[in-house]
Amino acid sequence: MALGKRFHWPSPVNPRNPGPNHKRSNVLVDIVAQDGLEWVKVSTLTQKRILFDIAKAGWIVDSSSDEDYDSESDNSSVQAEGLLKQAEGLVKASFAARVRYRHPKIRMVLPKIPRDCVGEVEAILKQIERMGIKVQRSEDLNPAPPLADVLDRVAVNPFADFTDPVNIDCTILLALVSDLSHCPVETEEWHHRAVKRQIEMERDDQLLPKSLWPACGPRKLLCTREAAQRMHEIVDLIGTDSEKQRRDFILDRDGTSELTCEQRVVGLQELSTHRIPHELKLPIEVVDVDITDMECRIGPIATEVSKTLSVINQSVFFYGWSNDMTTISSNRTVAKEVESLVENGRTCESDKGPDIWLCPTARSLVGKEKTRRNWNN
């Protein structure tokens, strides 16, 4: 995801200089990978250089002893140097950062350090490993493969860690049937400004082929009864004929309940200018949920979160949360609010919120012109 990125952590306040100009400490991470959950530090230090740093720090190592160097020692003349100092900085920065409720894991790659080292260097490396850092030495590194063989792994794949099945939010159900997502729409004067903005965005960045179809993939698709009902209400009220037909293909409805998955994909293709993936699993299965039961399974933090959510959002996000399931949504406001509540209400390191993948943009229904005779039909 990034190369050569700096991460910061708050330094201890100096009682002699507690002013606002107090600087934060930082560390350079060479590679940010795994969607931000892994930090890689590559060091070309040799054994000779590490021994020099040990001597500089004044750390006398007895290779037969199990005692570790303690960077918090009262002996202020002994300070971490070199590789150990880098490791400490990486750990502190990792503890100050969270990605999807988790601290990033750290990996140190040491291509010039062999598996069998002198005792002093081994002691340093063992202490680094005890910090929770994975250490890779020269023997652990395979020869570089041809670039063509690894390009698919080099590129960021935001869908790699999705669960199967996935939980579909009401906002995504609407995007899957909207005319805006499936075919070119000309801007009309009566269109809401949000719809006009989405029409312009769709011209430059097609939502279905670039985001939603890859997010759905060949996975089983689920949604809660509350999300489906809300979607039906909106489509029945303001949906165009084509939007209603698409709705009937992606969900079981009177007249389409007997259709096979293949027939649904074909029917959806006839209503779209984009290619509909053959692996798309239709219909989306509607599930009944018990919000109280889901709250109990999640824990006390869910009770606090529920106070700020509507019943529909409780059903959607608690369903994914209580089942460790990826929820696909474009409701950025609610997702960020849930994340903030979980972080602020955290009682232990293992606390985590729902796994939510936020779609880059939303798509509304085109809607009907209010002056049309059939507006209330």
Image (cartoon, rainbow, N blue to C red):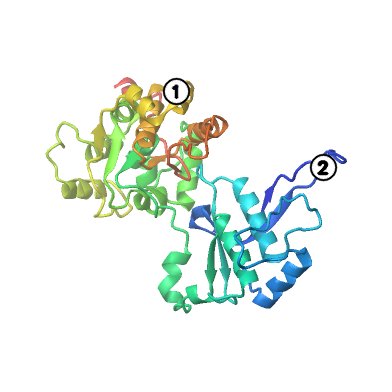
Identify the residue shown where x is 67% and y is 65%. 83
* Residue topped by disc 1: 303
Which disc is residue 14 wearing?
2
Which disc is residue 377 wearing?
none
Q: Are marks 1 and 2 in contact (CB under 8 Å)?
A: no
Where is residue 149 drawn, in percent x and y?
41, 74
How many C-alpha atoms fall within 10 Å of the one at disc 1: few (<14), some, or many (≥20)?
some
Instruction: Inspect the image, locate mark 2, and give the three-letter code of the amino acid beneath it.
Output: Asn
Tell me: residue 19, above or below residue 92: above
Where is residue 178 drawn, in percent x and y?
36, 39
Tell me: residue 65, above or below residue 216: below
Identify the residue shown where x is 23% and y is 44%. 282
Where is residue 90 drawn, in percent x and y?
63, 55
Q: Is residue 298 left or right of residue 270?
A: right
Secondary structure found at label 2: loop
Secondary structure found at label 1: helix
Q: Is residue 177 left or right of residue 257?
A: right
Identify which residue, 370 or 51, lies in the foreground. 51
1 or 2: tag closer to the N-terminus: 2
Total tally of numbered discs in the picture? 2
How many C-alpha atoms fall within 10 Å of the one at disc 2: few (<14), some, or many (≥20)?
few
Identify which residue, 72 or 219, lies in the foreground. 72
Instruction: Inspect the image, locate mark 1, and give the three-letter code of the amino acid beneath it.
Output: Thr
Q: Is residue 210 left or right of residue 128?
A: left
Residue 238 in view of the camera? yes
Q: Is residue 50 left or right of residue 245?
A: right
Where is residue 10 drawn, in percent x and y?
71, 44
- Quarter location, residue 300: top left
Image quarter where the N terminus lies is bottom right
**Mark whose residue sits in front, 1 or 2:** 2
